[in-house]
Image (cartoon, helix red, strand yellow):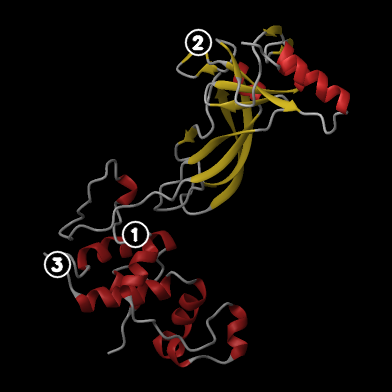
Amino acid sequence: MELDYYEALEVKRNATNAEIKQAYRRLALKFHPSNRETGNDERFNELGEAYDVLSDPRKKATYDKFGVEGLKGGIPPEHGSSGAWSSKYIYHGNPDKTFKQFFGGDNPFADFDTNDAPLLFGGLTPGVVKTQDSAIERDLPLSLDDLFHGCTKKIKISRRVMNDDGHTSSIRDKILTIDVKPGWNEGTRIVFPKEGDQGPNRIPADIVFIVRHKSHPLFVRQLSDLIYKVQISLEMALTGFSVEVETLDGRLLRIPINDIVHPAYQKVVTGEGMPLSQDPSQRGNLIITFDIQFPEKLSAERKSLIKQALTFKC
């Protein structure tokens, strides 16, 4: 005997789409094969085929007018102009596919999950808990000045948001505000939980911004220290000089160098580096390194003078 789709779903022939969905939800849970109490493979398969037809306006229109024979045998193309299904209908035969498409997974109650424990529904064995989409990571380029003083960044994102009907969605813009703290390090992660695309039966992804340093014309950051490189002549390296450094907060430091400077020499100025992220009142160090410029040529006379100057008598 041919399957009556309306009888299978236990609804009237004038049932609305919402009533058809409600009936399938109730009966699919009741007769799901994993339901230890009322599971029924044959009944579950009938429900899948019935919902596949009645939830599709064209298939339903053909079934309502021509019955199962017209639906599966095909109807003349001219009848399809009224919205009927003119080609031959064949159910894919996989009621689990229909079930998962309807519920968005094996577990129809995943939307109500509040923890990480698997849910049980009815007499069913544990289903697949709704999982969250993978985090969306984006770089957040910040200047050294931004990270020294702190600042506020506003970033506009576009994401898919579910409409009030719970079935359709639309693209909407949102402004995310990031309060950059003084001293944040490269790689600091700022997480906006569940701000990704919304969708039925899914947990939106977290959006994660990762701090990246922009290059600076004067300084190179090394954790909480600032590296400042100075080019000097050989004469300066041997006889002494002063270095002027304009700090990120606008002060001018004048630092005397009285030692003989060799290639590995560094001058450390305590407390003139980056703020510490855990305590911005504390600062790292300013480390001055030197690039000694040697002369390309020396005359014989100058070589002699240098030898005399560097000859030490014991």
For the residues marked 2 and 1, what is the alpha-carbon distance in whole angstroms?
Answer: 63 Å
Q: Give 7 or 91, whichever is nearer the viewer.
A: 91
Q: Amino acid at mark 1?
A: Gln
Binning the other alpha carbons within 10 Å of mark 3 as few (below 14), some (14 to 19) or many (20 upward) gives some
Q: Amino acid at mark 3?
A: Thr
Image coordinates of residue 62 in percent, x first then y, are 49, 81
Q: In percent of the image, x 41 and y 47: which residue is there?
A: 203
Q: Give 234 or 132, whichever is nearer the viewer.
A: 234
- Count up the numbered dots: 3
For the residues marked 3 and 2, what is the alpha-carbon distance in whole angstroms?
Answer: 68 Å
1 vs 3, front mark:
3
Q: 51 above or below 282?
A: below
Q: Identify the element where label 3 is drawn.
A: loop
Q: Looking at the image, which residue sits at the far front?
A: 314
Q: Which residue is mark 3?
A: 38
Quadrant holding the N terminus:
bottom left
Q: Amino acid at mark 2?
A: Gln
Which label is found at residue 22? Answer: 1
